[in-house]
Amino acid sequence: MADRPLPKTNEADTRAFWEATRDSRLTYQKCSDCGTVVFYPRRHCTGCLGRNLVWEESAGCGSVYTYSVVRQSYHPFFRDKVPYAVAWIDLDEGPRLLSNVVGVDDPVSDIRIGMRVAVTWEEHDDLCIPLFEPDED
Amino acid sequence: MTQKRDAAIVGIHEYPSRDVEGQVSALQIKAESAARALDDAGLSWSDVDALYDAGEGGGLGGLNMAEYFGLKPNVIDTTNVGGSSYEYHAAHAKRDITAGKARVALLTYGSTAHSRVQAIGVGGGGFGGAHPADNMDVFAGATLVANYAMVAQRHMHQFGTTSEQLAEISVATRCHAMRNPEAVQAMHDLEFLDIRETTVADVAGSRMIADPLHLLECCMISDGGGAVVIAAPEVARDCTKIPVWLLGTGEATAYPENGRDITVSAAAQSAPGAFDEAGVSPDEMDIAMIYDSFSITVLTILEDLGFCAKGEGGSWVEGGRLRFDRPDAGPALNTDGGGLSSNHPGMRGIFLLIEAARQLRGESCSQVADAKLAVAHGNGGMLGSRHCAGTIVMGRD
């Protein structure tokens, strides 16, 4: 059984993001000079010329901006997972990230755009992977 | 506005085979295509003084290609923006020729993606590598098809677009492919099933690959390549074929941003400048060569180029508007059969220039009578995340 492809934990810009996931913390950067939310993580601000980015923690709640259900993949891990849902998630704090929507009976019928979701963590040796599940009453 | 005629396509060649069975390399496809395109123009290797190359042949891109071809160019441009590279190359060739830095520019492409069994669309996530953006996405298993499918899903949500409307793109393109012997041969060589003209029901009823995109909304993976020769006016006048003028060019980039509207592509930025420079409007286009990696790519870009308003693409394409034999309805789309049904070795942008030039010369298999104006629009990277757009407006005398 192949493993999920995992991020590199020593990549310069994203290292701190993945380090925080070990403690189930979903983080993003905000410029303390101009207020720009920077995501994916970088060392410089994309809004001003500064480098005074501070790490903020997301509550892990957001909504599905858009999604697709993958029916066919040749990837050694994902080919056994079809059908599965990939989605762009808009976190309430602003960042938009790519992830999977899990915890539904049938991804084809049980996911919709605008659906409220919350982070759920998949544990690995050196990091945790942020996945999302429905968070609606 | 005065329409300028600073540079023209004078030579074209599309490598005829889509399955080289591992017997020909990408470099050999590039060199053979270059020779045939130069011959088409009535020029030779020694006339080339500018080389444009996306680096798909390996090595140090332009340096290695110059040696391989046996050229000593004054200009080398190795822009690689995926499938839109060739629209960028054409724009840069026009710029360099206009500036007096070059007289004859050579663009080439070669790929053996099919022979190498490269699973581009359903292989995995993104383009891999150590870029921080990829390092954030790698775990999700978003296939390339799924990346585009997420644009379609959002387009449907915002505007009520249907699978049947998206299918119109595939139907028109297949109609044109069936009239192109090389496209028909390609579909045989790539073992397409039930090769014939399709209906909206065929496309919308085909197997789902990544919701909401069906099999017949996805391009093929072929071998192939081609070449384009672009020349200054004083050279073009003495070439074998009529000049196909590059009237206007535009380039733009888009990528994931917090709050961004994913249904708007970079074409919305690249197109206005290209049409302005050409002094023409989208509704004057006889031909629209638009990168058809998937049905949604074309629908989105038709809107962004200005053929119709954002969100109205679905109803606009209904009723076969894009067929070559309805010239009064709208532009003829991808009259070679497109990436969906003729040729997609990974970076299709060069074929957009080639078929647009064929139409303006009167050489297409699905010829639009008296075609005078064409737009070629390349999309490189991935429509649902980071991508580049290159718009080229072309015309003949």
Image: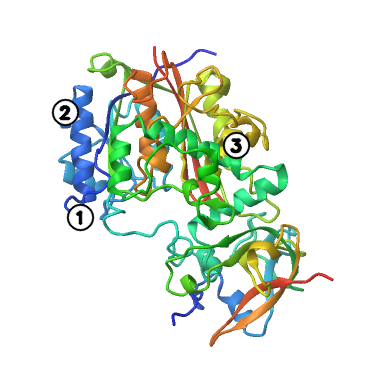
Percent x, y of residue A86: 60, 64
Q: State the residue position of label 1.
A: B22
Where does label 3 land, which residue?
Answer: B268
Residue marked by disc 2: B44
User: Mark 1 vs mark 3: same chain?
Assistant: yes
> Along the polypeptide, which appears first: circle 2 or circle 1?
1
Q: Is residue A16 above or below residue B68?
A: below
Q: Position of residue A39 (x, y in %)?
A: 64, 63
Identify the image quadrant of residue B309: top right
Helix, strand or loop at disc 1?
A: loop
| In this rendering, position of residue B204 left or right of residue B117 | right
In the rendered structure, which disc, 1 or 3, sits on the residue that comes first in sequence? 1
| Residue A79 can be seen in this image | yes
The x and y percentages for residue B361 are 33, 18
Task: Measure the alpha-carbon separation of dots 2 and 3.
Answer: 38 Å
The three-letter amino acid code for the residue at tag 2 is: Ser
Amino acid type of the residue tagged 3 in the rendering: Ala
Pointer 2 local density, CA inside 10 Å: few below 14, some 14–19, many at least 20: some
Question: Which chain hosts label 1?
Answer: B
The residue lying toward the viewer, choosing from B197 and B41, is B197
Q: Which of labels 2 and 3 is toward the front?
A: 3
